[in-house]
Structures are given as structure tokens and as C-alpha cells.
Image (cartoon, grey):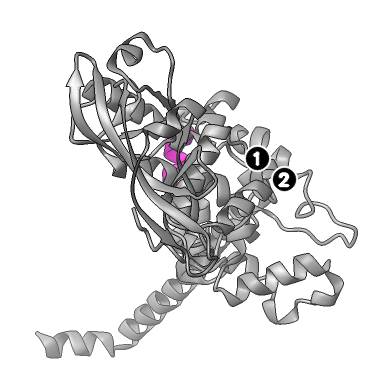
């Protein structure tokens, strides 16, 4: 059988047929590869990218207002320069992933401006994560680190660039929102805060240790707590309160901390650290119980370890501190990871975080309550506190 087949192949007619088959296969291969290459390049074009109204009416219009679209030198970047890898295999992987985008196009997931804005943060975060994972590869195709001319930058900008690169940061850590509008990233932590509110309502003060989810008032008697009158001061969010007793819907708690000698009306979480726990009205100071006195060896300031027994209401307290820190962690990432990478809180001392937060206030849209609990989160994870709480 094999011998017969061999004779047929090497007969004049067999050789001719095999030659035609090989030539036809070669031509078909060229046509297929050429067509495939053409299709890949065509789908990389700006014209193709904005052929869907979702892209044309939203991100494309934003992009045309940026230097990546139009510059004095005429150099610009099209969609594929930033969103499609140059290497063949990563490019093919990206094309496969794009099929999901076609699915959502036909479903109308982002078919209106309102729907697009609703999903903008999720879509942006997905792209940022991809760029973070590949060390901003598409950025580096044009912006070559070894060719940066720091003398042509403002001194502060040059220092920030050099410090960031030395710390291992990548382009997208700091350069978000340069070609498209920044999304509202507050949705994540606002949703988590809503969860804290629901948790407080369902728990109604249950537990042996409670933590305010926002600044609350405390009272020196159960009667005042029930009437919500004559408060003794305020307890800041995420301050630990040990439950001592209950009277109806009000709770007796013990709050402990540190008081600086001569600064009677503020209680701090740790000795020598301006981590705010509680404020006192003048009439409340005498109710403090002093448990010990120490001198800070670094500053020679005298500190008193104190505690206060007080009454609080159950509406805005939870028994899960990790839930509060989850909320503040998300807030830190969203609010402070927009213009630069949200670094390790341990890069700074606890008291330094006060000045840093003050300097950043004009760049972020946090209210005072949010700023206070975020500052506390960072201070308790600072270089000199090491996640003390």
C-alpha cells in the first residue's frame, strides 16, 4: 500500500499535482496571513476605535483636548499607541479581550452618556491595573526613561519624577487622567461607608468593644445620653470604646488614651503622637481618671495616661474596626492614588501625616469627617507607630 502510494507521488502526474498543491497552499498562506495582518492593523486604527458611538461621543472628545492628540511639534498618539501592546503575543491577547468589549457594545452596557459615566471608574481602574502590571509598557514605547532631560523640567517636577522612578513607581501611578477625564473614584468608599451605616443600624451597639463610624457626642450620665443633652465632648471615628454597662438603648463605655500635660481638653491615642481620640468640654476634664504619668524621652514633654467613663448612643457605632479600616483604605487609594501612587503610610512619621493631609486638602474632595478618619488611619500605620491599632 505504501509502495503503491509512493509510486503515484513520484509519477509525472503525481509530482505535478503535489507541486500545484504546495504552490496553492503557499499562496493561500500568504493571502491568509496578509489578510490577518491587515485585519489586525485595521482594528488598531483610530478610525476603527471611534467607529462605536460610545468611544466617539465620550473618551474621544476628551482625548482631542489633550497634548496626546495635538501638540506644537505635531507628534501625537492614537488609541492603539496607549491601549494595544506592540509585541505580537500580548497584542493577540489584547484582541481576544476586546471581544468582551464588543459584547457589551451590543448589550448597550455603556450606550448612553449616563451609563458610560456610571461605568467609567470601573473601566479606568481596569486599564490602570493593566498598565501597572506591565510597568506602563505602552507609555515607555515613546517616553524613554534614559532620555529624560530633567534640566528642562521645573525643579519640583524633576525631583518628583526622579524620586518616583527610584522608588519603583511606574508612569500610571502618577499620570492618570492625562488623555481622558478622571472618573469619580469616591463611589467605592462611599458604598463602604453606606455599609458601615447599615451595620451600625443592625448591630445597635452590640459587642464588648465599639467604634464610632463618625464623630459622635458622649455624655456623663445615662439620662443626658437618652435626652441627647449636655454632652461632655466628642469621640472621633475609629476610637475604641470598651463597653461597661447598658441602660435601655444607651451604652456606658470606657475610653482610654493619653493627655499632654497642660493640654487638658484633647485625648490622643498614643503617647507623644497627635492621633486624636476625643475632645472634652471644660466641665468634663475633672471626670478623667489619671492612671499614670510618663515623660517622652524624645521631646521631654509630660504625658498622662487617662480614661473616661461616659455614655453613648448606639446609632453610629459598630463592633468591627476592620470594617472601618477597609473603608479608610479604599478612601486612601481613591483620594490619594489619583495624582500619585498611594504610598505605604510607614514612609512618614505619625505627626508628619498631619501636615501632609493639610497640604493635600485642596487637591482632594474629602469633607472634614472623612479627612479626620483617613488621617487617623494613616497615623496608626506610620513609621513610628507600626500599625499600633
- The image quadrant that residue 138 belongs to is bottom right
Horizontal side of residue 72 vs 102, given as left or right: right
Name the residue located 83 percent from the left edge and 52 percent from the top edge. 70
The reply to whether discs 1 and 2 touch (Cβ–Cβ < 8 Å) is yes
Residue 52 spot, x, y in % from top left? 59, 36
Q: Which mark, by number, is residue 389? A: none
296 above or below 252? Answer: below
Viewer-closest of 306 and 250? 306
The magenta stretch spans which residues?
Answer: 99-105
Viewer-closest of 177 and 198? 198
Label 2, on which residue?
Answer: 63
- Dominant secondary structure, magenta: helix
Q: Which quadrant is home to the N terminus?
A: bottom left
Label 1 neighbourhood size at 10 Å, few (<14), some (14-19), many (20+)? some
Can residue 260 be spotted in the picture?
Answer: yes
Horizontal side of residue 270 vs 166, given as left or right: left
133 above or below 148? Answer: above
Secondary structure at badge 1 equals helix
Residue 389 spot, x, y in % from top left? 34, 53
Residue 376 spot, x, y in % from top left? 47, 47
Label 1, on which residue?
Answer: 59
Amino acid at each position: 500500500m505504501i509502495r503503491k502510494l509512493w509510486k503515484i507521488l513520484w509519477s509525472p502526474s503525481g509530482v505535478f499535482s503535489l507541486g500545484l498543491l504546495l504552490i496553492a497552499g503557499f499562496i493561500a498562506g500568504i493571502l491568509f496571513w496578509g489578510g490577518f495582518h491587515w485585519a489586525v492593523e485595521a482594528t488598531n486604527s483610530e478610525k476603527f476605535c471611534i467607529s462605536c458611538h460610545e468611544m466617539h461621543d465620550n473618551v474621544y472628545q476628551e482625548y482631542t483636548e489633550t497634548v496626546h492628540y495635538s501638540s506644537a511639534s505635531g507628534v501625537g498618539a492614537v488609541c492603539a499607541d496607549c491601549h494595544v501592546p506592540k509585541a505580537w503575543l500580548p497584542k493577540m491577547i489584547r484582541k481576544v479581550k476586546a471581544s468582551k468589549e464588543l459584547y457589551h457594545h451590543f448589550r448597550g452596557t455603556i450606550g448612553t452618556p449616563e451609563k458610560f459615566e456610571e461605568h467609567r471608574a470601573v473601566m479606568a481602574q481596569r486599564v490602570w491595573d493593566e498598565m501597572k502590571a506591565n510597568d506602563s509598557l505602552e507609555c515607555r514605547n515613546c517616553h524613554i526613561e534614559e532620555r529624560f532631560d530633567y534640566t528642562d523640567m521645573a525643579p519640583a517636577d524633576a525631583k518628583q519624577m526622579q524620586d518616583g522612578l527610584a522608588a519603583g513607581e511606574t508612569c500610571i501611578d502618577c499620570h492618570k487622567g492625562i488623555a481622558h477625564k478622571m472618573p469619580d473614584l469616591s463611589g467605592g468608599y462611599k458604598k463602604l461607608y453606606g455599609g458601615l451605616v447599615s451595620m451600625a443600624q443592625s448591630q445597635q451597639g452590640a459587642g464588648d468593644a465599639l467604634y464610632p463610624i463618625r464623630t459622635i457626642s458622649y455624655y456623663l450620665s445615662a439620662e443626658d445620653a437618652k435626652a441627647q443633652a449636655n454632652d461632655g465632648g466628642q469621640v472621633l471615628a475609629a476610637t475604641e470604646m470598651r463597653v461597661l454597662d447598658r441602660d435601655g438603648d444607651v451604652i456606658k463605655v470606657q475610653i482610654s488614651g493619653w493627655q499632654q500635660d497642660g493640654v487638658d481638653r484633647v485625648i490622643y491615642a498614643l503617647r507623644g503622637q497627635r492621633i486624636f481620640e476625643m475632645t472634652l468640654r471644660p466641665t468634663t476634664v475633672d471626670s478623667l481618671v489619671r492612671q499614670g504619668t510618663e515623660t517622652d524621652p524624645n521631646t521631654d514633654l509630660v504625658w498622662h495616661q487617662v480614661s473616661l467613663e461616659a455614655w453613648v448612643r448606639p446609632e453610629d457605632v459598630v463592633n468591627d474596626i476592620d470594617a472601618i479600616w477597609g473603608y479608610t483604605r479604599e478612601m486612601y487609594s481613591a483620594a490619594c492614588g489619583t495624582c500619585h501612587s498611594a504610598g505605604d503610610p510607614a514612609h512618614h512619621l505619625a505627626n508628619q501625616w498631619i501636615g501632609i493631609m493639610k497640604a493635600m486638602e485642596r487637591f482632594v474632595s474629602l469633607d472634614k469627617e472623612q479627612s479626620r478618619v483617613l488621617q487617623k488611619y494613616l497615623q496608626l500605620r506610620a513609621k513610628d507607630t507600626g500599625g499600633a491599632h
